[in-house]
Image (cartoon, rainbow, N blue to C red):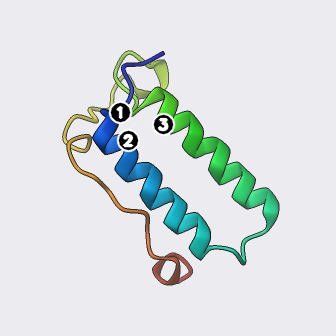
Amino acid sequence: MNVGLVAEARDAYVDGFARALASTRTSPQWLASARREAFDAFVEQGFPSRKHEDWRFTDMSPVTPFLLPPGDEAVASV
């Protein structure tokens, strides 16, 4: 397992995801399940690093210090 997210950042992402999931109740159940599985994997593994083969040429360090809130459903539907 990767070092993962720092507890405080992880908690902020978990809270934001819960709010985003609640605001997308009109989404099909299969989509909500896929989102939850993907988010659970993210919480467990953290951001990818160059040690991950598929991400070896991507430097995620500029992004990882920021808490990025989930997107607005209204904006995402445009």
Whole-angstrom CA distance, mark 1 to mark 2, is 5 Å
Whole-angstrom CA distance, mark 1 to mark 3, is 7 Å
Q: Quadrant of residue 61?
A: top left
CB of mark 3 within 8 Å of CB of mark 2? yes
Q: Quadrant of residue 64?
A: top left
Residue 77: x and y, percent?
56, 80
Earlier residue among tags 3 and 2: 2
Disc 2 target residue: 10
Which of the two residues, 41 or 53, is positioned nearer the viewer here?
Answer: 41
Please report the residue visible at 43 percent of the width from the left and 69 percent of the height from the top: 71
The crowding category of the residue bearing disc 3, from other C-alpha atoms within 10 Å (few below 14, some 14 to 19, many at least 20), is: some
Instruction: Say what amino acid the circle numbered 3 marks.
Output: Val
Earlier residue among tags 1 and 3: 1
Disc 1 target residue: 5
Task: Label 3, secondary structure: give it.
Answer: helix
CB of mark 1 within 8 Å of CB of mark 3? yes
Task: Label 2, secondary structure: give it.
Answer: helix
Please report the residue visible at 38 percent of the width from the left and 34 percent of the height from the top: 47
Disc 3 target residue: 43
Q: Is residue 58 left or right of residue 31?
A: left
Up-down relation of residue 57 to residue 19 (above or below): above
Residue 15: x and y, percent?
44, 56
Which of the two residues, 49 or 2, is positioned nearer the viewer here?
Answer: 2
Residue 67: x and y, percent?
28, 52
Instruction: Say what amino acid the circle numbered 1 marks.
Output: Leu
Instruction: Say what amino acid the circle numbered 2 marks.
Output: Arg
Task: Label 1, secondary structure: give it.
Answer: loop
Up-down relation of residue 3 to residue 18 (above or below): above
Residue 17: x and y, percent?
50, 57
Whole-angstrom CA distance, mark 3 to mark 2, is 7 Å
Up-down relation of residue 60 to residue 22 (above or below): above
